[in-house]
Amino acid sequence: MLTGAALRSVSIVGHTYMSRNASNALSGVTRTSCKVHVSKGTHHMYTLGTTRRAFVQALAALPMLGRSAASTALPSNGALVPMADFGLSPGLVHLNTASAGPTSNRVLARTLAAWRQLETDPVAQSYYERPDTVFTAANQVRGKAAALVGCSPDEILITRGTTDGITTLAHSVRLERGDRVLLSNQEHEGGEVGWLHRQKLDGVIVDRAQLPLQEYDVDRIVQAYRAAISPGTRVISVSHVLASTGLMMPIAEIAKLAHAHDILCVVDGAQAVGHIAVDVVALGCHAYATSGHKWLMGPKGTGFVYVAKNAGKDIEPPQWQLGRAVGSDSAGLAPLTLAVGLGEAIDDVRKLGMSQIERHNFALARFIHAELAKMPLLRVVSPPAGPSATAMVAAMLPPTVDAGLVTARLRERHGVVIKLAEKRFFNGIRISPHVFNDEAQVATALAALRIELEGFSA
């Protein structure tokens, strides 16, 4: 409940939202909201439900805004970037950046401007390396990506995303029949499909390091990889941040292990770049792939790959056979306008600064973690605050609760978007706040989640 010292007033407001039913007819849905005025004059709006019982229960579950426990108190910071800077639907609470982040109006405008420019003279704008062409603007994005992750532009290949990047890397490594590639049992499909294709095509063998769902200890994680290495292991391919739980993997330690055994270390950075600070040289990996559409909030269908110069004899992307520019006779005509938009998104992230982004997102994640832990049906599987924690918080539901139904109802009834966890990992949910989210949105989502879970039993 709210503490008396902090509370000034609570006002209840009824809102009617229009939604479309299965037959595409408009129907009205009334939601009850609570505006909380606290001692410093700040305001927080929480959507609490459609019934008096749901409202009372959800209100009782709201955080005590005046309490001092740092681990469960709402973070004091608001959104780093105003919601008005994005094109999200009014009232939508988007807490699934780990799947796809919204592109800002500014980035979208720059992308469309580049497209319009390209169409004024398609050949010159697409192929000529002149100061005023879209080709040149897109090619400069390699330098922006390099500055973001700490390498040189000639080590950057622009791609369509992490899956495209990892698949490119899998088919760029010299492997023979019987050579082995070590993955974990918690890799995203996009991080393993290229290697599985090599297994099917070339007789490469894919092994798995077994990581328990809630294993957060660095030494034990590294030991799991050490135990899975065999004399034939040629590549370790590992996620920087696990998509399943948000665990930040000990990449530097795994890369060191790989170097000690003359093994290539390839990193799936889909959930890292734009989310946490990344320095590929400091990590010591040989290659790193990431996406532009998640935490960078760039155009969908963008990404990039880093290949270390000292790995050139072992990793040869076919796109680089006739040059390393964003477009060449070996790479073909690149998605130039999307690349320009990606560069704009990288500029925005660098301007905000990764330290500020981490501070904001991790504060929201700590609050989410603490509040999910209080909900009887949920078991939080993401690491608690510490060196392995990120802004992604996942929780498991019992088999009797349909997690897909829960996430669908959150969207349909409350306008809250979170991730349905992949069933191959666990039955549950994942929440991933970003720079455009604030404390009120998070509290709205958590109150809505409590309401939807009350109809289920363990």
Image: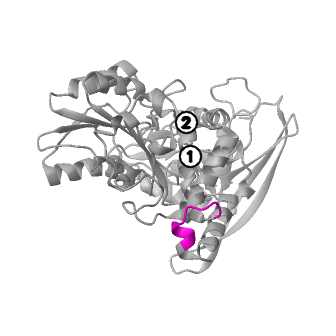
Which residue ends up furthest to the top in the rendered image? 219
**Which mark, residue 276?**
2
Residue 242, percent from left and from top: 41, 38
Q: Look at the image and tell me in which quarter the C terminus lies.
A: top left
Q: Is residue 337 above or below residue 454?
A: below
Residue 57, percent from left and from top: 64, 44
Look at the image and say whether residue 298 sits in the magenta stretch. Answer: no
Q: CA distance from mark 2 to mark 1?
A: 19 Å
**Residue at point 14%, 50% (across, down):** 202
Q: Which residues are the magenta region? A: 124-132
Instruction: Specify few, some or many for label 1: CA neighbours under 10 Å numbering under 14, 14-19, or 20 or more.
Output: some
Read off the residue under disc 1.
Answer: 143
Instruction: Specify few, some or many for label 2: CA neighbours under 10 Å numbering under 14, 14-19, or 20 or more.
Output: many
Give 134 or 214, whichever is nearer the viewer.
Answer: 134
Q: Is residue 370 visible?
A: yes
Q: Looking at numbered disc 1 in the image, what kind of residue is underneath it?
A: Gly
Q: Is residue 413 above or below residue 120?
A: above
